[in-house]
Amino acid sequence: MDRNYAELVAYQERLEAQNTELQSMRGFLESVLASVSDVLIVASRLGRIEQVSASLSARMGQDAASLQGREVAGLFTDAPALQRALDDCRVGRAPISVELELAALPEPMPHELVIAPRRDDRGRVAGFVLTGRSVGELRQAYQALAQSHDELKAMQGQLVRNEKLASLGRLLAGVAHELNNPISFVYANAHALERYATKFETYFDRVTEGASRDELIALREELRLDRELRNLRDAVRGAREGAERVRDIVADLRRLSADGAGEIAQFDLVEIARVAAKWVLRERAGDVVLEHAGCDSLILQGRAGHIQQVVMNLVQNALDVLEDQPGGRVVLTCGKEGTQAVLQVADNGPGIAPELQAMIFDPFFTTKPVGKGTGLGLSISHKIAQEHGGRLILCPDARTGACFRLELPLTADAGGAA
């Protein structure tokens, strides 16, 4: 009896220990079910709910007790789809994923569900564990992110347009200054021609009226027709020269704007650099000297208007640095290195500090005063060079001033042209 009593006591102690362990495990599971933010459903083999997380109860607007025993498929708007997923999981004995709408309150919410089989001690499928995460919130966050991205792109596009408009403003100032002189010359000669025409009309009117030879000689001397005839030729020649000058300016503008719409075609890098640099320099006052060196022609394939923008940005930056500096000089050097066409734009200014060289091509980075630069010129130029299969870098061997090096691939027939 003592032995039996001792065994009963030991058995009772084991039961109490196991009960305590079960209570602890139950409390742990309940705390997990109450804490998880994702939807968690434990279902039987027949698809009936056994346990649910507190998050599911909150989304369904019902307590866990009222949900137990219900068909798990009834919690979703597309019950047949969930039932098919449960059947596939039972047959395949492997987790599957499916996206379904949970019939939550106040409105259904799309969830990404992972259905995993729950096995018994014999390895048979005894039920299912469904875990789901709301993708509605993720989609809302993605939409907000996409909207912010679109707004950022629109703002960047606006800044790029502002940079182009600033370049256009500088170009128009140069055009106005360049056209003013020949047009004024033509205008003045037109007034002179009008005065000469009036004198000749007076003389020929007297001829048709039958004036005598002596009267005509006296009138000719009075009107100084011999001198005006010589001046007339000079006025015609001057007006023609002014008109030809305007024609040349218009031709340069046409070359400057050619292919600006983005069409890919062959163009001469040397000619592009010459015209673009000349127009930037025209609207600047001062004694800056513009020099060209290197080869006479480099034929490339690409968007000529974009490359013109690069050259104008580089020359404009050089002129900004040389502002109010005596003896300023900008040198454009074109050459060919292997299969690359190289254009270097160098100035004799103060140069670029070493600590700034790593940021020089960053968007919105500028060393100019507020209101004088957007910090997009070099960034846009750098991107244009990359789009043409080349690159824009700082000259590695520059000793004085700043020097930028534009490298672009030559076309197949560029060797003979160069």
Image (spheres, helix red, strand yellow):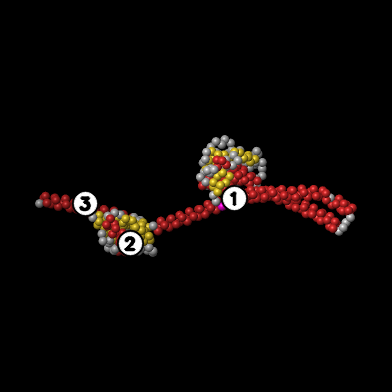
Query: What element does badge 3 sit on?
Result: helix
State the residue at coordinates (55%, 44%): 300
Spatial separation of the CA atoms under disc 2 and disc 1: 61 Å
Magenta stretch encompasses residue 32: no
Magenta stretch encompasses residue 259: yes
Q: Amino acid at mark 2?
A: Ala
Look at mark 1 in the image and give the residue it sits on: 258
Between residue 266 and residue 249, name the one nearer to us.
266
Q: Position of residue 260 (x, y in %)?
A: 57, 51
Q: Amino acid at mark 3?
A: Ala
Look at mark 2 in the image and give the residue it sits on: 81
Q: Which residues are magenta?
A: 257-262
Indicate left or right for 151 with 103 as reference: right
Figure quadrant of residue 107? bottom left
State the residue at coordinates (57%, 46%): 267
Q: Earlier in the sequence, mark 3 or mark 2?
A: 3
Secondary structure mostly seen in magenta is: loop
Spatial separation of the CA atoms under disc 3 and disc 2: 45 Å
Q: Nearer the viewer, mark 2 or mark 1?
A: 1
Label 1 Cα crowd, 10 Å radius (few <14 / some 14-19 / many 20+): some
Res. 75 in view: no
